[in-house]
Every structure is written in C-alpha cells, then in structure tokens.
C-alpha cells in the first residue's frame, strides 16, 4: 500500500462506520487508547491490561469480545497516519458526557504504569481539544481518575 493509499484510508471513514456505527465507536476508542499506551514510546504490559479493562467495562464486553476488539483496533492504531477519522467517529457519535468518559479511559491508561509521562499529558490535552471538551472537563476527568 502506497503513501497516498494510507493517507486516503486514514482520512476516509472506514467501512465499519457505515456497516455498524457502534462497532466503529468501539474501534475508535480502542485506537485512541492504544495511541495513549504508545505515547511514551514504551509498550508497558500494565497499559495494555488497563486498555482491556477499560474496553470491557465501558462497553460491557466479555473476554472474547474484548480480545476481538483489541485485534481489530491494533493494526489500525499501528498503521494510522492520522487520528482524524477516529476522532470524527467519536465526535459525531458520542454525547459530551460520553466523550468525557472516553477521556477518563485515556487518563486511566496513561496512569496504568503509575506515572504520567510528559508526552502522555500532551496527547491527553490534544485529544481533549480534538474531542471538543473544554479544559474544565479535561481537569474533571483527571480528578475522577486520580481521586485528588
């Protein structure tokens, strides 16, 4: 697959969004969570454990469904040139409260290894803005996760 094909694929909504909008939202959330796990350039097992926990809990999935979602999202996260299509899926398909829940999931993954890396915090801020969440929701989500 050439560069232009990858760019087109990254910018166009995937077939999942057309066939099953709920699945598209789940994949989009999973891709963002994986991006968060990779933000510090370390692939910590605790972050992947937390991703599975967040997906399973948030979407009420069983273990097999969670693994299937992870398997569907992993190549997309790996090949993504841009997160635009995933953010678009979430922005059009979720309420503000649901987007804040996704942000909380992202915070939980960022803190899964018991430390917040500067790159993780930068990505969190950027994703909050791209999800059209005000700074107060960014702080609210952080406090919900850290218990401060």
Image: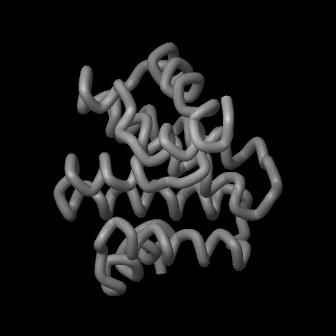
Q: Residue at x 56, y 28 (%)?
A: 70
- Residue 16: x and y in percent read 35, 26
Q: Measuring from the top left, give residue 123's x and y in whole percent.
A: 58, 70
Up-down: is 1 above or below 111?
Answer: above
Q: Is residue 99 left or right of residue 86?
A: left
Q: Quadrant of the N terminus?
A: top right
79 or 105, which is in the foreground?
A: 79
**Above or below: residue 143 compared with residue 30:** below
Farthest residue to the right: give it. 42
User: In which quarter of the view is residue 52 placed?
Assistant: top right
* Side of 56 where 59 appears, left or right: left
Q: How many marks?
A: 0
Q: Position of residue 7 (x, y in %)?
A: 55, 46
Q: Is residue 148 left or right of residue 40?
A: left
> Is residue 50 shown to the viewer in this render?
no
Which residue shows up at 54% across the image and 58% down it? 108
């Amino acid at each position: 697959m050439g560069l232009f094909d990858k760019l087109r694929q990254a910018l166009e909504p995937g077939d999942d969004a057309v066939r099953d909008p709920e699945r598209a939202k789940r994949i989009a959330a999973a891709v963002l969570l994986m991006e968060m796990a990779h933000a510090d350039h370390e692939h910590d097992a605790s972050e992947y454990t937390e991703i599975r926990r967040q997906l399973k809990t948030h979407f009420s999935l069983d273990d097999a469904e969670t693994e299937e979602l992870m398997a569907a999202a992993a190549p997309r996260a790996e090949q993504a040139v841009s997160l635009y299509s995933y953010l678009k899926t979430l922005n059009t398909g979720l309420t503000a409260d649901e987007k804040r829940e996704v942000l909380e999931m992202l915070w939980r993954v960022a803190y899964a290894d018991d430390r917040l890396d500067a790159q993780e915090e930068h990505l969190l801020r950027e994703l909050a803005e791209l999800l059209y969440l005000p700074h107060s929701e960014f702080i609210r989500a952080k406090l919900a996760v850290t218990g401060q």
